[in-house]
Image: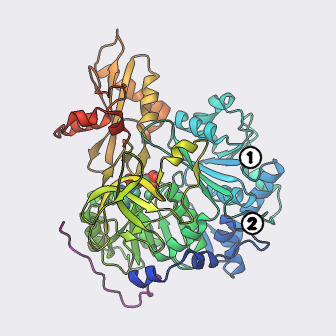
Amino acid sequence: MTWTTIRKTPQPGEPAPNFADYETGRANFSWETARAELEGLPGGGLNIAYEAVDRQLRAGRGDAIALRWLGKNGERREFSYAELARSSNRFANGLNRLGVGRGDRVCVLAGRIPELYVAALGALKTGAVFCPLFSAFGPEPVRVRLAKSRARVLVTTTLLYERKVRAQRSALPDLEHVLLTDGGGVEPGAGSFHALLEAEADQFAIPFTAPEDWALLHFTSGTTGSPKGAIHVHEAVVAHRLTGRSVLDLRPGDVYWCTADPGWVTGVSYGIIAPLANGATLVVDEAEFDASRWYAILEQERVNVWYTAPTAIRMLMKAGGDLARGRDLSALRFAASVGEPLHPEGVVWGLETLGQPFHDTWWQTETGAIMIANTRTQDIRPGSMGRSLPGIEAAIVRRRSEGGLDLLEPGAEGELALRVGWPSLFRGYLDDEERYRQCFAAGWYLTGDLATRDVDGYYWFLGRADDVIKTAGHLIGPFEIESVLLEHPAVAEAGMIGKPDAFAGQIIKVFVTLKPGYAPGDALRKELIGFARTRLGPAVAPRELEFAVDLPKTRSGKIMRRLLRARELGLPLGDLSALETDEAQNL
Ligand code: PRX
């Protein structure tokens, strides 16, 4: 393996990095010390929202700006930590008045609007479980997640409610309260979020929540079955706060921009919790990607720390460096990336165009927080995800067929595994003990990612061991996509793959076989794509659809998506007999 190393020279006046030196950091690390840095609830216990917001008030930062919201139509609103504490207290009081609290699921289906942040923090304060739903999901993924989570409360907008929820309400018996952020009282069966807030007091005494109490529910996908609800507990905030400081280099007063949508795990762990727990100011942009707008935000908001993703970096690269020229980006101290492979060119482009290289970081919904990273003081090896953080033991392993694991040597390719024992590791998949159990072997959590480690401990991503894909940074499982297509009367079978794409990383492509009486053709292709788009939402719908006479299957009838992918890419098909077993499909 060859690489070049990027060594950064500290700029004059730059504050010293929070995380001084990798080897010392690892040698001196203990989770006990990290836990002790949290304040804990005044009466005992631990609560994410308290550590994120109320604690900052006690530290005298009540007037500091917690959230700076940039509306898509040019509006601009700021919320101090004290204001965020008051609004989230009001929402917590309102939830309690509705009889909602400890352990109840509160879902939010909304774009990047201030109410989402208030609802998340308020729900956490009551001991309820906050569950974000991506606003670009169509009605079907929304219904599945609302049903699986058994949500009692949904906070959303009138438009999203009308388009994605209202018609399905009778199929959601647990959903007692819908609170609309922009109205209420008009829609039958829905109330007003703001009216609820206005009726309540500013003060709320957070009840005791234990570190192991459930706090967050994030849906994620695997190869088989419907989405899995990964459960995180309040103790996860230990890792959020720590990695916010050590990896993202956050400190009180920093202006911080995480471009991930809060409908996914990054937008919650690093778009809400980690930065607030470190006293930073969140920049929240309601608008969709636009290269000029993004440079203007970096410049005008004087963003110090930026956490974004390879798809966005590729789109900025495509838009051309000219847009950045003449911009004063001198406030930017640290730029990082997550969620998909970050190509070496992206790292170098960051350095040349923004004055900062992108630092790749790796983690997953299940790990709850960053596990592997290029930190500010480390030399960057472009193309590598970086090294495992203090407190995290990573390895490349091979599962033994009879159970157990072999730990592999540097240079070997295998599955990335992490030794169990950090606070933000998920505590279960909702109602699916068996799938949870399958993620562990011999005290290690198995990530499903294929990677290799070099002799210096840098990890290099190779791909997934299963059939999930990343499109524009969103993790998509084949089951949801294929099931929707199978609902169409013309479709007999469907198989989804990720097709490489210069911008989105991968796009969703499906292969379908048709039922007797239907013939392939452009009109049917358009109809099927449209059908899937309406139900799934544009962000997760197939972009390409190909008709096939049959789909390759294992002896027991499972579709072999890996063969579809190999065919699509014109790859050698290799040893087919090895792939024909069900075990090979379940790697
Ligand atoms: O395959 C890895 C990829 O994203 C997966 C996790 O996705 P999700 O659960 O949606 O979590 C989002 C929070 C990061 C991983 O299993 N992935 C994540 N980071 C990287 C990555 N692939 C390559 N390089 C990365 N830095």
Dot 1 crowding, Cα within 10 Å, few <14, some 14–19, many 20+: many
Secondary structure, mark 2, is helix
Q: Is residue 393 above or below residue 262?
A: below
Label 2, on which residue? 86
Q: Quadrant of the N terminus?
A: bottom left
* Magenta segment: 1-19
Location of residue 235 by image quarter? bottom right
* Residue 43 is inside the magenta segment: no
Q: Is residue 102 above or below residue 295?
A: above
Left or right of 482 in this view: 219:
right
Q: Which residue is identified by label 1? A: 192
Q: Between disc 1 and disc 2, whose residue precedes?
A: 2
Residue lying at the far front in this picture: please name it: 402
Q: Nearer the viewer, residue 6 or 88?
A: 6
Most distant residue in the top direction: 517
| Residue toward you, 423 or 469 | 423
- The label on residue 351 is none
Question: Looking at this rendering, what residue extends furthest in the bottom direction?
Answer: 12
Observer-nearest residue: 35 or 507? Answer: 35
